[in-house]
Image: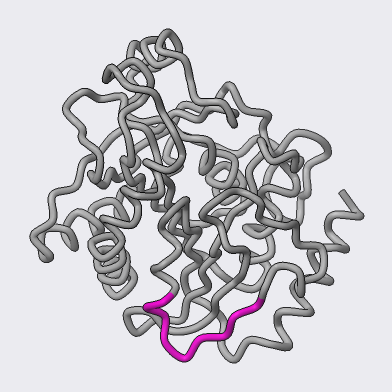
Amino acid sequence: MEDTLSKLKQTVGHLSLKIRKKPYIAIVLGSGLGSLANSIQNKLEVPYHAIPNFSKATAPGHEGSLTFGELGGREVVAMKGRFHHYEGWSMNEVVFPLRVFKLLGVENLILTNAAGGINTQFKPGDLMLIQDHIGFFADNPLRGANMDELGVRFPDMSQVYDRDMIQVATECAMKLQYEVRRGIYAYAKGPSYETPAEIRAFRTMGADAVGMSTVPEAIAARHMGMKVLGISCITNMAAGVLEQTLNHEEVMETGKKVEEKFSKLVTEIVRSWS
């Protein structure tokens, strides 16, 4: 853990010399949702390969850079591309950027993702505010010696996704006349899609959507006391819901179709976040 802390401090020191103002909110952009970064004003783009100790984004639809600047009148930093456990990164590497954000002074986090719809009332293109998650199939990012400088050994997870922020997001959607869903997000390791039997099991447990990210980041963020809002873009229906095979091209196509709606909603949330 001492090695991780020294790397975090090195990365934070490097970025602190580049940015003009401390970000108020960090935004992690999921598959096909990276275009939100185009709405950021007075931006500074920092590619991952130019950041000490950062990994490389390899998943399709994840560009691999940090964008600092203004969105909705607030200072933000957006991750255009996240790190997934299925890419071969350790959980420590997956959540490394979130820890950097916290040490930069960021207290608020918006996690977005592309997800498969389990709830049969959902349809591709829907946006779902995450109320809670099912993540016990994942390696926990807090496994190993605890970093006391970041949080306690046994952090409470009874409210991972901030209820006040969910209410703010709901009100912003109403203002924009957008319908948004609320639901439970289930984490699956990937990269293979889930089987129909696994989806039926998730549905029995109460899951409304499934994806391959977000949960490790949310756990690490709550460990550090950050406020977290999660938004899933339902890009396809999960295995067995419809009589069709799954592919990543559908995920990207749906993300493209809803990018304007998604960008407007997130911008309004950032503007309204207090």
From this view, report whether residue 261 is shown above or below residue 185. Answer: below
Left or right of 215 in this view: 186: left
From this view, report whether residue 195 is shown above or below residue 189. Answer: above
The image shows residue 194 at horizontal and vertical percentages of: 48, 20
Left or right of 164 in this view: 80: right
The image shows residue 164 at horizontal and vertical percentages of: 29, 54
The image shows residue 196 at horizontal and vertical percentages of: 40, 12
Left or right of 126 in this view: 136: right
Instruction: Name the residue: 33% across, 46% down.
Output: 233
Q: How many marks?
A: 0
Q: Main secondary structure of the magenta part?
A: strand
**Segment colored magenta:** 38-46
Instruction: Name the residue: 36% across, 45% down.
Output: 232
Q: Is residue 184 magenta?
A: no
Instruction: Name the residue: 57% across, 47% down.
Output: 217
Instruction: Name the residue: 34% across, 11% down.
Output: 204
For the C terminus, give its image quadrant.
bottom left
The image shows residue 192 at horizontal and vertical percentages of: 56, 26
From this view, report whether residue 117 is shown above or below residue 68. Answer: above
Q: Decide which of 12, 82 is in the foreground and name it.
A: 82
> Residue 273, located in which quarter of the rendered image?
bottom left
Q: Is residue 41 magenta?
A: yes
> Residue 256, located in which quarter of the rendered image?
bottom left
